[in-house]
Image (cartoon, rainbow, N blue to C red):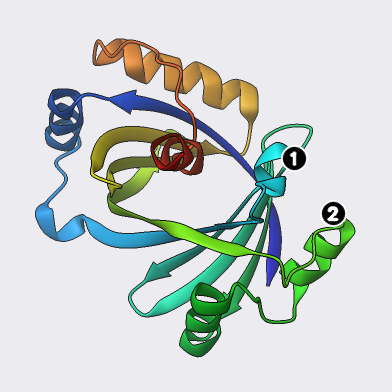
Amino acid sequence: MSETIEIEFKNLLTKVEYKKLLNAFTVKDEEIISQSNHYFDTPDFTLKELGSALRTREKNDHYEMTLKQPADIGLLETTQTLSKNEFLAAINTGILPKGIIQERLEQLNIPFTNLEYFGSLTTKRAEFPYNEGLLVLDHSLYLNTEDYEIEYEVLDFQRGQVAFKALLEQYNIPLRITPNKIARFYQQKI
C-alpha cells in the first residue's frame, strides 16, 4: 500500500514515430513487457466525473489496484496489492477488498460495493531512465483500437516539461493533446 504523486507528460505517437523511438533508444524485443489495465467505475461514472480513475494492473501474475485522483500538481496515486482471488472477485462482482482504496472511495462518498468492471486495455511497454526521469514507450490495444504513446515521469514539473518538449523536438514529433489511457478507453467504450 502506498500513496505517491505522479507527474508525467505524455504524447500520442504514430506507429512510425513509435518505431523510430524504439530504434533511437535501442530497445530490444525482450525489454518490452506486457501488462493489462482493468478499469472500474460506478455505473454512472462518478469517478470519471471527479477526474479520478480506478484500475487494477495485471503484470506477471501480480495485481495492483490504483486509485488516481487530481492533485495540485500531477495525480495522487493510491495503490494496494491484490491477490489473484481478490482481483477475480472485483472483476466478477465489482466488490473490492478492504484496504486503503476502500477508505479513499468512502471519503469520496462512493460505496465500494457499487463498482462495475468496464473492461481492459493491454499495453506492450518499454521503460528506461532518461534525463532524471523515466521514459515509457507504449503500444496499447483495447476495444478494437490500438495506439502508441510516449510518457515521461519526473519528480520536478518544470524541468520535466522542458526536457519532454526538447525530446519531442529532437525527433520531430508534434505535441498532441493526449488524454490518459482510461479516458481513451472510455471514449471507445461509450
- Residue at figure coordinates x 30%, y 43% from the top left: 138
Asked whether, in this view, residue 46 is left or right of residue 185, the answer is: right
Q: Nearer the viewer, residue 48 or 2?
A: 48
Write down the residue under mark 1: 50
Q: Is residue 27 above or below residue 162?
A: below
Kindly state the secondary structure of the residue where label 1 is placed. Answer: loop
Residue 126's x, y, as percent? Answer: 27, 49
Q: Give x and y (percent) for residue 79.
A: 64, 65
Residue 35's disc number? none
Reading the chain from its start, which is encountered first: label 1 or label 2? 1
* Residue at image coords 24%, 16%: 171
- Give the tally of numbered discs: 2
Q: Nearer the viewer, residue 140 or 189?
A: 189
Horizontally, residue 111 falls left or right of residue 49, namely: right
Marks 1/2: CA–CA distance: 9 Å
Report the amino acid beneath label 2: Leu
Asked which quadrant contains residue 145, the reply is top left
Q: Quadrant of the N terminus?
A: bottom right
Residue assigned mark 2: 108
